[in-house]
Image (cartoon, rainbow, N blue to C red):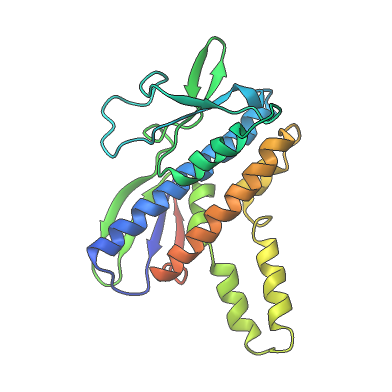
């Protein structure tokens, strides 16, 4: 699947590069978090997750199989200490964090960003306005590129109703997470570890808020989103 994104205005090449780089990082994290939730619902223990102490390099020729990165931090929400907070801090702050989970006697990546579900720019036109064809998991892409559009439509509509503007806008923002199809589905799936769900919801909210600001600055929130097979 791919999505066609059409911006509203001309952007210099460095802005386009920054937008795609940040969006791909958000995609990477969103998919990783959703897959962690899915895995715990399928029976993977929360203590079976580890995260690399190093982010994926821009040109990662060695791949990301377990052992390429020498240091890892285990996630164990039940254990006393700051390990859980450190785990999620790395996931939040690193551009391309790598999370593994224990499968049989080995550790395998939760999400392989160079695999079949990678964030891939299949076509790009940098004329006015820019147009991107981007492939990946459709639901995750749709959520990222739609970030902020609900708020934008609500703001325009509520200008006609100033008495209720503030309250209704706050209510819309509170509903944004539940309207994200993939994120909402995995968070509410039966069997998801409650500790994972707690942190995942926080991280997904931060990702979507960051993407919303990014879309607004790049004038993507007013762009057209089409689905292609």
Quarter of the image for residue 215 reads bottom left
Quadrant holding the N terminus: top left
| 212 w.r.t. 30: above or below | below
Left or right for 145, reference 119: right
Q: Position of residue 119 (x, y in %)?
A: 39, 44
Q: Residue furthest top?
A: 105
Q: Position of residue 50 (x, y in %)?
A: 53, 26
Residue beneath the point at 57% across and 35% down: 35
Quarter of the image for residue 52 reads top left
| 60 w.r.t. 27: above or below | above
Q: Is residue 229 visible?
A: no
Residue beneath the point at 41% across and 70% down: 217
Residue beneath the point at 48% across and 65% down: 213
| 196 w.r.t. 26: above or below | above
Q: Residue furthest front?
A: 81
Residue beneath the point at 65% across and 48% down: 201
Q: Is residue 99 visible?
A: yes
For the image shown, how many numbered marks are present on the structure? 0
Left or right for 51, reference 45: left
Left or right for 99, reference 200: left
Q: Position of residue 202 (x, y in %)?
A: 63, 49
Left or right for 10, reference 155: left
Q: Position of residue 124 (x, y in %)?
A: 27, 56
């Amino acid at each position: 699947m791919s999505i066609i994104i059409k911006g509203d205005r001309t952007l210099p090449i460095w802005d386009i590069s920054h937008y795609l780089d940040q969006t791909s990082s958000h995609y990477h994290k969103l998919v990783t978090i959703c897959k962690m939730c899915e895995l715990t619902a399928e029976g993977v223990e929360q203590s079976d997750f580890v995260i690399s102490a190093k982010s994926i390099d821009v040109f990662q020729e060695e791949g990301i199989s377990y052992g390429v990165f020498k240091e890892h931090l285990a996630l164990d929400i039940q254990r006393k200490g700051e390990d859980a907070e450190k785990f999620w801090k790395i996931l939040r702050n690193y551009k391309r964090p790598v999370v593994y989970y224990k499968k049989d006697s080995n550790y395998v990546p939760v999400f392989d960003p160079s695999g079949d579900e990678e964030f891939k720019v299949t076509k790009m036109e940098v004329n006015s306005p820019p147009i991107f064809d981007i492939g990946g998991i459709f639901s995750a892409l749709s959520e990222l590129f739609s970030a902020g559009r609900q708020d934008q439509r609500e703001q325009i509509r509520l200008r006609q109703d100033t008495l209720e503007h503030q309250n209704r806008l706050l209510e819309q923002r509170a509903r944004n997470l539940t309207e994200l199809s993939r994120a909402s589905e995995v968070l509410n799936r039966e069997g998801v570890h409650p500790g994972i769900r707690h942190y995942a919801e926080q991280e997904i909210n931060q990702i979507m808020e960051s993407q919303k600001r990014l879309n607004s600055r790049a004038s993507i929130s007013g762009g057209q989103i089409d689905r292609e097979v």
